[in-house]
Image: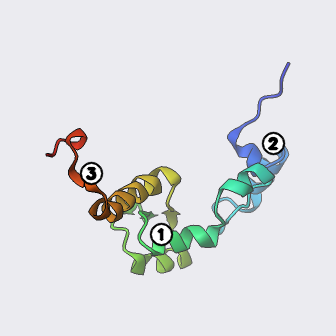
Amino acid sequence: MPRVVTPLASWFPSDAAIARFRRRALGVAPVVLAPRDRAWRSIVPRFAECVAMAAAGLPFQIAADRRYDRSGDPAKLRRALGAGATVYLPQIHQALPRLARLIVTTTAPWTRSGSSSRAGGR
């Protein structure tokens, strides 16, 4: 029978490792865990890069004291991270639509079909 692989396998090699993490770190201090497998590390930016993307304007949310701050205000980001708040950083499904809109916005003025009949224009 094939072994069941949990989503946590990228960070924890065994149930014992999960139990150790729960005892030693969970709820004690903010922790950043690097993925163990190369495939995951090759597609996901490092933590500092994710923070830089959020500071540059990609959406993020801060959860602290049973409240959510969805303003995406970069001035609040470092303070929240320093205080140990939970910060939900940008994910690819949030970044790609913005990138697509940016590409369309910057290329439309140079194309003849900026308002083609396919887009409902004349």
According to the image, label 2 marks what residue? 15
The residue nearer to you, when weighing 51 against 20, is 51
> Residue 106: image x %, image y %?
34, 65
**Mark 1 touches mark 3? (CB < 8 Å):** no
| Alpha carbons under labels 1 and 3: distance apart | 33 Å
Residue 52 vertical placement versus 25 (above, below): below
Q: Measuring 65% from the left and 57% from the top, which residue is drawn there?
A: 44
| Residue situated furthest top in the rendering | 1
User: Label 1 neighbourhood size at 10 Å, few (<14), some (14-19), many (20+)?
Assistant: many
Comes first in the chain, label 3 or label 2: 2
Q: Is mark 3 on a helix, strand or loop?
A: helix
Q: Is mark 1 on a helix, strand or loop?
A: helix
As drawn, is 97 to the left or to the right of 15? left
Q: Does residue 84 appear anywhere in the picture?
A: no
Looking at the rendered image, the disc whose residue lies closer to the viewer, 3 or 2, is: 3
Comes first in the chain, label 1 or label 2: 2
Looking at the rendered image, the disc whose residue lies closer to the viewer, 1 or 3, is: 3
| Residue situated furthest left in the rendering | 122
> Residue 68: image x %, image y %?
37, 61
According to the image, label 1 marks what residue? 54
- Residue 42: name its quadrant: bottom right
Comes first in the chain, label 1 or label 3: 1
| Alpha carbons under labels 3 and 2: distance apart | 57 Å
Residue 63 vertical placement versus 19 (above, below): below
According to the image, label 3 marks what residue? 113
**Mark 3 touches mark 2? (CB < 8 Å):** no
- Residue 49: name its quadrant: bottom right
Amino acid type at circle 1 is Ala
Amino acid type at circle 3 is Ser
